[in-house]
Image (cartoon, rainbow, N blue to C red):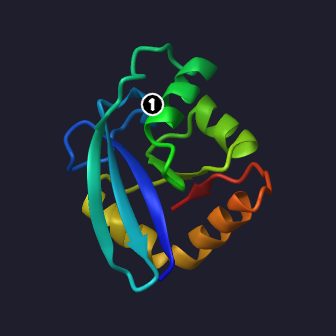
């Protein structure tokens, strides 16, 4: 079954942080599936939080922590989200919704579109699309 691994930046596990993903205390990892199911995988500590706002070193530090993810989810588009979209295999997604449970529902509804983007990236294609849902 097709799945997408998500990384959501949050300080409390209930809400997507209002700041950039790299400025959150934790990364919550979820798998979503085409049948609209989602599974919590684990919570990871953001050890790269103090590496400097919008710095490439911070982006690299975050990627080391969440390297098995396909999609990075935040409420704000950051300079590093733009870099990630242009230069990596990860698909950034900016969401308007605050509650993680609602975000998961929204992402599941957009599964096909997100899966297409992540598949293109896994196949080596590089493009600057940041999905906004």
Q: Please report the residue visible at 32 percent of the width from the left and 71 percent of the height from the top.
A: 38
Q: Residue 78 in the image: x percent, y percent?
A: 56, 33
Q: Is residue 62 above or below residue 13?
A: above
Residue 99 visible somewhere in the drawing: no
Q: Is residue 107 left or right of residue 10?
A: right
Q: Please report the residue visible at 45 percent of the width from the left and 30 percent of the height from the top.
A: 22
Q: In this view, does 97 lie to the left or right of 3?
A: left
Q: Nearer the viewer, residue 110 or 123?
A: 123
Q: Residue 97 in the image: x percent, y percent?
A: 36, 57
Residue 24 visible somewhere in the drawing: yes
> For the image shown, how many numbered marks are present on the structure?
1
Q: Please report the residue visible at 38 percent of the width from the left and 65 percent of the height from the top.
A: 31
The quadrant where residue 12 appears = top left
Q: Is residue 65 left or right of residue 81?
A: left
Q: Residue 118 in the image: x percent, y percent?
A: 63, 63
The quadrant where residue 60 appears = top right
Q: Please report the residue visible at 62 percent of the width from the left and 30 percent of the height from the top.
A: 79
Q: In this view, does 120 lie above or below 14?
A: below
Q: Nearer the viewer, residue 45 or 55?
A: 45
Q: Is residue 50 above or below residue 104?
A: above
Q: Residue 34 in the image: x percent, y percent?
A: 46, 82
Q: Dot 1, crowdedness within 10 Å: few (<14), some or many (≥20)?
A: many
Q: Residue furthest bottom?
A: 35
User: Which residue carries the number 1 mark?
Assistant: 22
The quadrant where residue 56 appears = top right
**Mark 1 secondary-structure assignment:** helix
Q: Which of 58 and 77 is in front in this view?
A: 58
């Amino acid at each position: 079954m097709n799945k997408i691994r998500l990384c959501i930046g949050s300080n409390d596990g209930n809400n997507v942080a209002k700041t950039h993903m790299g400025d959150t205390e934790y990364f919550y990892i979820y798998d979503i599936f085409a049948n609209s199911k989602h599974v919590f995988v684990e919570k990871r500590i953001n050890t790269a939080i103090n590496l400097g706002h919008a710095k490439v070193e911070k982006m690299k530090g975050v990627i080391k922590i969440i390297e098995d993810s396909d999609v990075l989810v935040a409420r704000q588009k950051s300079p590093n989200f733009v870099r990630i979209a242009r230069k990596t295999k990860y698909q950034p997604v900016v969401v308007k919704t605050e509650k993680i449970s609602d975000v998961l529902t929204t992402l599941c509804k957009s599964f096909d579109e997100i899966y297409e983007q992540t598949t293109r990236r896994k196949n080596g294609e590089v493009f600057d699309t940041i999905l906004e849902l």
